[in-house]
Image: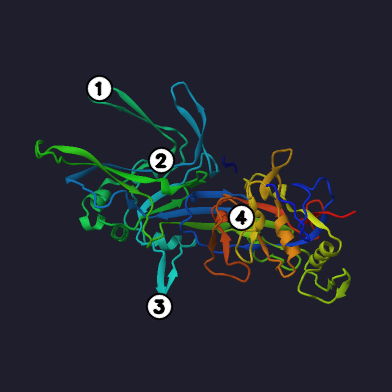
Amino acid sequence: MAVFLYSCDKDFNAIGEGLVGDDHFGLEAVKYDVLAYNQEVTPIQSSNMSPNNALGIFDNPLFGTTTANFVTQLGLATYSPTIGASPVVDSVKIEIPYYSHVTATNEKGDSTYELDSIYGDKNGKFKLSIYESGIQMRTSYFSGGNQLPQYYYTDQNSEFSNKKIGARLNDGNVLQNDEFYFDAKEIVIKTTDPDTKVVTTDRKKPQMTMLLNKQFFQNKILNAAASKLSTEDLFQEYFRGLYFNVEKSGSNPSNMGLINFSDGKITIYYKAKTESTTDEDSTMENKSIVLNLKGVSALTSSTANFLDYVRNADYASAITTSVNKTEGDEKLYLNGGQGSLAVIKLFNPTDVLSYNAKGEVVNGANGVPDELDEIRSNATVKNWKVNEANLVFYIDADKMKGTGEPNRIYLYDLTNNAVLVDYSTDASSTYGGLITLDSDKRGKSYKIRITGHIRNLIKDATAKNVDLGLVVSQSPAVLAFNALKNKNEVISAVPRTSVMSPLGTVLYGGKTSVSDDKRLKLEVYYTKPN
């Protein structure tokens, strides 16, 4: 299996905040224990995740098989369109651009493209069927007299599948349905002017291009009552959207793509009687109507991704029955979508003592890990200053052999479903989370700097040592959280950047049975007075 993808801090004088520079200048780290364990992500909100929604089937030898189906509302580019008299459909085309980049361009101007965000076999195929959706999507509903947000979740595929209407609309070329594939070819359209004979060349980036059933759109749009096409709300109730259903294509290998469906459109090309008063009554002219693959009404949700899973037995066990919340897990399984994350608890949980203002040990628990008590005492009494604090997560290279690796992981405040102060300060360079490669070009580790988080824990004795969450990340710019369908005692929401990602990784945890050179530790570099 292969995957194809393509500050300077100020000086501080306050206790525990002193900084010498942007790195630790060779200082030796003081290492502290970290308790980390796996947590399953159960069905989760998957509505309105634009710009990235998944479509296809991804077979991952480590985690299992994910099938991604999709539903989207449609919106007329112009409401109350003037259709014309006696309209007749010529053709209906759906176009949805892929993420891609140019690898070469020849002297004729023809470009060669490579697709980005395609996961699995690059020659993969799957059966794709597009139907009219029978469910009107909304953003809220009323219950007990209260207006509540209406979410759609990863496990609702059967609900939408059972409510699809009629036959599939992409009923033509087999390469556009039963053996659909993500085509990386540039689309070149040449048009010859009938009068001047001048040839015009129109070039488009690779995109999903399919012909849809003409009779359906003749009846649904061209023959519709004018009132049905007059406003966004009326149109959304009348035409509730399109449902994209995915299945295996015989014995063909499959793949999955992340697509920005909101850039897609449907164009209905048709002929209608000319409005000219000088033409004969039978004269027809070429016209078109555009439908965008999104709804814009404040009353509706516009899209949802549905993810069906067949998990590998070892992975399923690791995130459910084998989880050790007391000692931590040896291996941390991070997997996007409705997958799994790791819960991170900084410091050994032992709590039997504290320190007084003189730095003397006082016996008795105080609700704070003893290691954190020691750090706070060293900062206050000995004037130790945190220069840098990191978490380094080592990748289990043996487990990950032959699988695609995420380029980035993301650490956040799990207790409050919020970003960490370090991420807010500088997510791009200081915070980290990007993969580090070994000499064999395989992933070795991920390093995340949490200096600001540790300083805040030190300077504020009342600050809570919150649980942290660790997930795979599709995009560092996406900071929203998606709600679980059913909250549990550990998590209520997951970062959307993880729900968007189909990839996963296996990292070493902080359990004592993990070898010291791979074990997860909190590394803190201090500057100490002479």
- Side of 128 relative to 1 (left or right): left
Q: What residue type is labelled 2?
A: Leu
Using the image, tell me which numbered label, if any, was put on residue 207: none
- Secondary element type, mark 2: helix
Q: Earlier in the sequence, mark 1 or mark 3?
A: 3
For the point 52% across and 67% down, the residue is 485
Q: Position of residue 505 (x, y in %)?
A: 65, 51
Mark 4 and mark 3: Cα distance apart in space: 38 Å
Instruction: Kindly check if marks 4 and 2 are in contact, taking CB atoms under 8 A apart as contact.
Output: no
Residue position marked by numbered label 2 in the rendering: 175
Q: Earlier in the sequence, mark 4 or mark 2?
A: 2
Q: Position of residue 388 (x, y in %)?
A: 76, 52
- Side of 504 relative to 194 (left or right): right
Mark 1 and mark 3: Cα distance apart in space: 67 Å
Q: Earlier in the sequence, mark 3 or mark 2?
A: 3
Q: Which of 397 and 371 is in front in this view?
A: 371
Q: Which of marks 1 and 2 is nearer the N terminus?
A: 2
Dot 1 alpha-carbon crowd within 10 angstroms: few under 14, some 14 to 19, many 20 or more: few
